[in-house]
Amino acid sequence: MAGNRVVTAVRGWASETVPAPGPARGLAVLAVVQSVGFGLFLSSSAIFFRRSVGLTAGQVGLGLSVAGLAGLLCTVPIGRLADRYGARGPLLVLYAALAVLFTGYCAVGGFAGFVALACAISVCETSSHPLRMTLTHEVFEAEARVRVSAQMRSLFNLGFMLGAAAAGGALAAGGRDAFVAVILLTAAAHACCAVLTGRMPGRPAEPLPEPAQGAKKRSGLRDVRYVTLALLCGVLELYQPILTVALPLWIIGRTHAPGAVNSVLLMLDTVLVIVFQVTASRGADTASGAARLLRRSGILLAVCCLVFALTQGTGALVAVPLLLLGTAVLVLGELGQAAGSWGLSLHLPPPGRQGEYQGVFALGRGLQQTAGPYLVTVLAVGQGRLGWTALAVLLLLAGLACPPLARAAEKARAGDANADAARPAEPVAS
C-alpha cells in the first residue's frame, strides 16, 4: 500500500512538472541539460581554481566579483537585442559562446586569464536568464507563461542536484584530469543547449509602438516603479545567500549543531523546490496575484530569520529541529518569491519591450548576488539575533511594499496604453 501511494505521488508530480510534448517540453529539457552542467561546474570550480590553476582564495573571490559586475552591466543591452531580433537567436549565440568559453578554462594558467574568462562567462550566463524569460513570453500565451517558468525551475533544481552529485566523483578523484573532464562536460551541456534553443519555435518580437510625436522612447531604466519592484524582488531573493552563505557560517560559529547538518538543509531546500514549485506558482498569472505572492514571501522569509535567530548558542537537540523548521519556512518564501518575480517581470513590461525590461528586472537579482553574501554575513553572522531581526524587518518591508507598487505600475501602464490609443494617426503624405 505504501509503495502504491509513493508511485501515485510520483506520477502526480510528473504530470504537474513535466510538460506535454511541444515547446514547453523543449524548454524543460533545456533547463535540465543546462542545470546538470551548472551543477557539475559550480560544485567543483572553486577547488579547481585553487588546486589546478593555483589561484588564492582571495583571487578567486575578487575575480568572481568582477565577473558579476560585468554580467550586470550587459543584461539591458542584450535584452534590447531580443526586442529587435527575437529572443531565440541571441540566446542560441550565448549558449554556443558558453560552450567555447568553458572549454577555455582548461588552458587558464593565471589570474588575468581567469578574470577575462570569468567576465565573458558571466556576461553570457547573466543575460541568458532574461532571454529565456523573453523567449517564454514570445512562445507561450499569457496564462501558460508562469506555469512553464515554474516547471523549468523545478526541473532545473533536479538537474542541478544530479550535476552536483556527479561532481562528487571529480572531487573524490582530485586530479587535474577529473576537473578537466568536468569542464568539458559543462561545455558539452551548453553546446546541447544551443542545439535545443535552435529547435525552439521562433516568433518575431512584438512591434515596438511609436512614441508620441515629438516624444522620445523612455528607457526601461527610468521606469521607476518597475525598477523598484525589481530591486524589491532582489531583496526578497536574499533567501539564497542566507541559505548558502549565512547558515553554514552560523551553524559552525553560533550553534552547537554539527556542521554536516548544512548539507541536509541544502538537500531539503532542493527537494522541496523540485516537488512544490509548480503548485506554489498558482496565482501568479496576473500582476496583482504575483505581488500578493511576494507579500506572503516577505512574511515567510521574515519568520524564518526569527526562527534561525532562536538557535544561537543552543545545543544540537534544539538547534537541529529549529534549523530544519526555519529552512522549511524559507523554502515556502523562496517558492513564492520565484513565482511572484516571474509574474511581475512577464506581466508589467510594455508591448514590444519584453527583452529590455527582462534585462532591467535582472538588475535586482544581480544586486543581490553582488551585495547579498556580504550583507547577510555582516548582519546574521556578525550581529547574531539582532542581525537576524534586522534581516527579518528588511524582508518583511520588501514584501509588504510589492502589492501597492504593482498596482501603481499597472495603472501607469494602463494610462500609457490609453494615451497611445487616443493619439491621432499620423497624416499620410499625398
Image: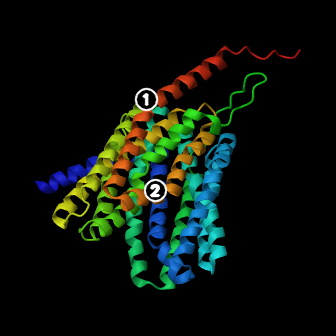
Amino acid type, label 2: Leu
Q: Nearer the viewer, mark 2 or mark 1?
A: 2
Q: Position of 211 compared to 174: left or right?
A: right
Image quadrant for the C terminus?
top right
Q: Distance between the residues labelled 2 and 1?
A: 30 Å
Q: Is label 1 in a helix, a strand or a loop? A: helix
The spot of residue 25 in percent (x, y) is 45, 49
- In this rendered view, identify the residue nearer to me: 148 or 67: 67
Image quadrant for the N terminus?
bottom left
Q: Which residue lies furthest to the right in this view?
A: 430
Tell me the residue at 29%/71% (across/down).
Answer: 259
Residue 249 seen in the current view = yes
Tell me the residue at 65%/50% (across/down).
Answer: 89
Colouring style: rainbow
Name the residue beneath numbered marker 2.
375
Badge 2: how crowded within 10 Å, few (<14), some, or many (20+)? some
Badge 1: how crowded within 10 Å, few (<14), some, or many (20+)? many
Q: Residue 400 bears which disc, if any?
A: none
Name the residue beneath numbered marker 1.
288
Query: Is residue 231 positioned above or below 63 on the image?
Result: above
Tell me the residue at 61%/17% (across/down).
Answer: 418
The spot of residue 285 in percent (x, y) is 42, 33
Tell me the residue at 59%/52% (across/down).
Answer: 127
Amino acid type, label 1: Ser
Assess whether mark 1 and mark 2 are in contact (beta carbons under 8 angstroms): no
Q: Earlier in the sequence, mark 2 or mark 1?
A: 1
